[in-house]
Image (spheres, rainbow, N blue to C red):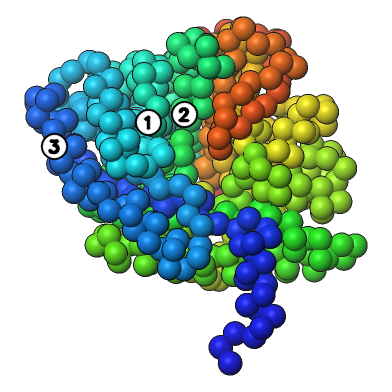
């Protein structure tokens, strides 16, 4: 017998009781050959190529859901960083590219399209600067477009001029959508060490080192991992770790099946499988609740960073045993507004911005979906970004920041975004200024990795 009745029941429970799903299938499309001197001609090439490669993305996703009984929550597209495509046009307003992408996403039925992006870790070209300047208006005027900017890497250091600029642009984007609690900022993420093959929004783009098109998969199963921890109640952490690793292996095999089949039906390469514990606002789909099941009273309690380190490492170890295609971010996400346990932890005061920053040293991404007071100075936002970029640079890992200055809101107020973006209490920010530090600009040099302690 290939599978025992117990194994079949366990798999069914993963879907029916513990909210296991494919969080996203993301089709990456290269638009490098769409660059050209004319804006209209370039946009037409973008439209033609995206429709040619992605017209069957949503239908294929639905076919696989029906045939395999595996929920695929989001169908998405990621494109070449638009700064690389639009620069050849000579335009200095890149908002038309965002509108074209938004129209394509709506026509194709995908929930988000990523790639309104720039890579400025060593410096910014005229096209990079034009794209960054266009971000607030682009995100405020579209529904499905996501933007990202890579500000640093472990090899090049941190571009502090770009860090300072992003603090200002985040504030402007929030102001343009003040009637919606600054929702434009929920579609904007800044990175250190951004991967070129990430299927998760808002940071997904199809990197210049990628091929013509590739289908990548993001798998998520916080409920499954929590159920594993419940079965090991009172057991030593080594035993729990082994149980998490075995569950991650099974989850990954399911993702490998879906990714391989979807890529085959679309006639594109299978890119990577991102095994990340990505929570949602739904009860039973929370990373914070896993930490509680490990023995913490609430997320943010002493021991939270250690528990998250164990969780992230075991998820990665289980994944790499199950697939040679593991990539993207892979680990555990700790967004505030998208995790009902994290929302409760912030509301009760068990976790603050500084503890969240400490936990990002060991998780997949960084400070994610965090609402802050609307009057937070741009320099303070830049300082928070710089701190998170430094964590990524020094630890040779991907880190990111998705902060939402909520116009008119103060610490303790609430923001409401709806859907997967959720809701969250506004979290307090350290009032001490870093303006003089941020105004220095320049480049923070890369660290020396040959001499470590």
Of residues 38 and 8, the one nearer the viewer is 8
Residue 300: % across, % down:
79, 37
Of residues 312 and 53, the one nearer the viewer is 53
Residue in the picture at 87% in, 65% down = 235
Residue 245: % across, % down:
66, 66
N-terminal of the pair, mark 3 or mark 1, is 3
**10 Å neighbourhood of mark 3: few (<14), some, or many (≥20)?**
some
What's the distance in space between the residues labelled 2 and 1, CA to CA? 7 Å
Residue in the picture at 72% in, 32% down = 343
Residue 346: % across, % down:
76, 29
Disc 2 marks which residue? 187
Disc 3 marks which residue? 45
Q: Secondary structure at mark 2?
A: helix
What's the distance in space between the residues labelled 3 and 1, CA to CA? 18 Å
Side of 83 relative to 255 (left or right): left
**10 Å neighbourhood of mark 2: few (<14), some, or many (≥20)?**
many
| Image height of 271 relative to 283, above or below | below
Disc 1 marks which residue? 145
Task: Determine contact: label 2, label 3, CB under 8 Å.
Answer: no
Q: Quadrant of the N terminus?
A: bottom right
Side of 314 relative to 202 (left or right): right
Residue in the picture at 63% in, 69% down = 12
Task: Determine contact: label 2, label 1, CB under 8 Å.
Answer: yes
């Amino acid at each position: 017998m290939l599978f025992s009745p117990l194994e079949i029941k366990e798999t069914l429970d993963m879907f029916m009781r513990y909210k296991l799903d494919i969080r996203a299938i993301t089709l990456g499309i290269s638009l490098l050959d769409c660059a050209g001197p004319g804006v209209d001609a370039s946009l037409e090439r973008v439209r033609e190529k995206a429709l040619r490669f992605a017209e069957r993305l949503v239908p294929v996703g639905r076919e696989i859901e029906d045939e395999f009984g595996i929920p695929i929550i989001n169908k998405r597209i990621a494109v070449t960083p638009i700064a690389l495509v639009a620069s050849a046009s000579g335009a200095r307003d890149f908002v038309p590219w965002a509108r074209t992408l938004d129209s394509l996403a709506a026509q194709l039925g995908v929930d988000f399209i990523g790639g309104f992006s720039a890579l400025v870790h060593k410096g910014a070209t005229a096209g990079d600067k034009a794209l960054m300047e266009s971000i607030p208006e682009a995100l405020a005027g579209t529904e499905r477009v996501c933007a990202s900017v890579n500000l640093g890497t472990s090899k090049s250091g941190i571009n502090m001029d770009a860090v300072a600029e992003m603090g200002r642009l985040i504030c402007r984007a929030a102001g343009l959508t003040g009637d919606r609690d600054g929702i434009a900022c929920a579609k904007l993420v800044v990175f250190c060490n951004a991967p070129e093959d990430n299927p998760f929004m808002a940071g997904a783009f199809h990197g210049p080192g990628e091929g013509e098109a590739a289908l990548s998969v993001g798998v998520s199963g916080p409920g499954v991992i929590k159920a594993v921890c419940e079965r090991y109640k009172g057991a030593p952490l080594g035993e729990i770790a082994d149980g998490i690793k075995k569950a991650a292996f099974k989850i990954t095999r399911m993702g490998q099946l879906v990714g391989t089949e979807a890529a085959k039906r679309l006639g594109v390469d299978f890119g990577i499988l991102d095994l990340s514990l990505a929570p949602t606002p739904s009860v039973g789909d929370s990373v914070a609740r896993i930490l509680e099941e490990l023995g913490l009273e609430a997320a943010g309690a002493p021991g939270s960073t250690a528990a998250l380190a164990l969780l992230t490492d075991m998820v990665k170890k289980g994944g790499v045993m199950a697939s040679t295609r593991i990539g993207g971010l892979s680990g555990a996400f700790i967004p505030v507004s998208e995790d009902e346990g994290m929302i409760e932890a912030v509301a009760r005061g068990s976790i603050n911005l500084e503890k969240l920053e400490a936990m990002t040293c060991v998780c997949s991404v960084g400070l994610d979906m965090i609402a802050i007071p609307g009057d937070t100075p741009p320099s303070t936002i830049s300082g928070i970004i710089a701190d998170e970029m430094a964590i990524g640079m020094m630890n040779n890992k991907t880190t990111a920041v998705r902060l939402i200055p909520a116009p008119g809101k103060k610490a303790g107020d609430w923001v409401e975004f709806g859907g997967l973006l959720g809701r969250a209490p506004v979290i307090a920010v350290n009032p001490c200024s870093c303006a003089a530090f941020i105004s220095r600009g320049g480049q923070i040099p890369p660290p020396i990795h040959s001499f470590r302690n």
